[in-house]
């Protein structure tokens, strides 16, 4: 067990409010939220911090960072990604794949499984919670930056061997004849999500009734909202789907973020990065799924101009939401922490600051810059200054 720590002076961002003038006590898990006088009678290291303490961010859609990609299929790639993510406040994530040759996808899945086993025994930074399989079950007309040469119809033929690590699967339901794959996945533990889809409004609603309750990077690579053809976006508004939103100001216009989220309600939105290997690095030319990507002015694009992931960080997403919307800090944090935890069914141990939950904590200064990060009570990042 990690040494007990007692945080005093900080504003504690809880699920639906901010708590002042209390002390946070944690080791591997949150031990309690106490009056400072009571907390100071306990043994432990005292941390004085004049800022906000928020739960660790959970990114359910991230391909890479720091020059590495999940599809590299190497332990070094996941070590590097997990090592750099805490500097943005991300404490856990889904390792997200791309559409490539099946043997390459399988190699990446095997690598993630091995890495997750290692994380049970070693501290390796941000925790990999499983895999988000984005591709190959996509519509070629809405493939975006995915490689159309390797797209497949949805099938349980090889997916069944990986159900222990598959936590989310993006698919185009119109490509699943008779919804056979969707039905075969019922009760298997993976979130099914509409994405890269040409589904009509009616098909999307039918998929919802079959158990597809999530939407990948809403608005992007799917049928948009039209008053006579509402499409996937219309279905997202008509049914209580949860939705991913990439708040980089590029994938969704910043002026529309608040209006859309208020229609969906805060509890139905997961802020994700969809970051690729260029994240945390500078502008230049990179690779995503075997395709050349140019990063300029914060946007990642293929040679033909197609958006290809992002270089967004979770702390930047928080800042963008504060800048462009009127949501309270605790609401934005909920979209980065509790909502993804709930979607993955792990909110009993992650996603908010509460006794008994993992001590995944982010210390933000008054300007909402990340200062320190703890993962299960162990320091994963520090910028030194605490007061």
Image (spheres, rainbow, N blue to C red):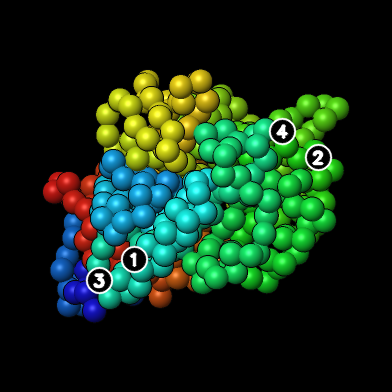
Mark 4 in CB contact with mark 3 (< 8 angstroms):
no
C-alpha separation, residue under disc 2 versus residue under disc 4: 8 Å
Q: Position of residue 320 (x, y in %)?
A: 43, 32
Residue for badge 4: 223
Q: State the residue at coordinates (57%, 39%).
A: 149
- Which residue in the protein does label 1 denote? 115
Reading the image, the residue beneath label 2 is: 201
Residue indicated by mark 3: 122
Badge 4 vs badge 1, beta-carbon distance below 8 Å = no
Q: What residue appears at the point 55 percent right and 70 percent down from the top-left corner?
A: 161
CA distance separating discs 3 and 2: 46 Å
Considering only vertical position in the picture, is 296 above or below 50? above
Q: Are marks 2 and 4 in contact (CB under 8 Å)?
A: yes
Q: Earlier in the sequence, mark 3 or mark 2?
A: 3
Tell me: residue 338, above or below residue 239: below
Q: CA distance from mark 4 to mark 1?
A: 36 Å
Q: Earlier in the sequence, mark 1 or mark 2?
A: 1
């Amino acid at each position: 067990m990690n040494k007990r720590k007692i945080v005093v002076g900080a504003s504690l961002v809880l699920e639906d409010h901010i708590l002042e003038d209390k002390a946070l006590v944690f080791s591997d898990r949150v031990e309690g939220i106490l009056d400072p006088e009571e907390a100071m009678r306990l043994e432990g290291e005292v941390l004085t911090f004049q800022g906000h303490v928020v739960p660790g961010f959970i990114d359910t859609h991230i391909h890479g960072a720091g020059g590495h990609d999940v599809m590299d299929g190497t332990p070094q790639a996941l070590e590097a990604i997990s090592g750099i993510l805490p500097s943005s406040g991300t404490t856990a994530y889904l390792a997200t794949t791309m559409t490539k040759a099946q043997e390459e996808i399988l190699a990446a899945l095997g690598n993630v499984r091995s890495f997750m086993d290692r994380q049970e025994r070693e501290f390796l930074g941000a925790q990999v919670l499983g895999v988000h399989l984005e591709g190959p079950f996509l519509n070629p007309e809405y493939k975006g930056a995915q490689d159309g040469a390797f797209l497949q119809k949805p099938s349980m033929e090889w997916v069944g061997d990986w159900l222990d690590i598959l936590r989310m699967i993006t698919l185009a339901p119109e490509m699943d004849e008779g919804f056979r794959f969707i039905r075969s996945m019922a009760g298997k533990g993976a979130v099914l999500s509409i994405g890269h889809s040409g589904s009509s409004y009616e098909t999307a609603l039918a998929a919802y009734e079959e158990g597809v309750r999530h939407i990948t990077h809403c608005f992007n690579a799917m049928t948009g909202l039209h008053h006579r053809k509402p499409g996937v976006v219309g279905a997202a508004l008509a049914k209580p789907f949860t939705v991913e939103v990439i708040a980089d100001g590029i994938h969704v216009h910043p002026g529309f973020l608040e209006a859309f989220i208020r229609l969906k309600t805060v509890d139905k939105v997961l802020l994700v990065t969809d970051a690729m290997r260029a994240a945390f690095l500078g502008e230049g030319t990179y690779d995503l799924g075997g395709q050349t990507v140019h990063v300029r002015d914060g946007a990642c694009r293929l040679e033909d101009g197609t958006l290809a992931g992002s270089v967004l960080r979770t702390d930047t997403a928080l800042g963008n939401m504060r800048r462009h919307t009127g949501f309270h800090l605790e609401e934005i944090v909920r979209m980065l922490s509790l909502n993804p935890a709930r979607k993955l069914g792990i909110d009993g141990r992650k996603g908010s600051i509460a006794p008994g939950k993992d001590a995944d904590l982010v210390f933000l200064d008054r300007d909402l810059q990340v200062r320190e990060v703890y993962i299960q009570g162990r320091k994963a990042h520090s910028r030194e200054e605490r007061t």
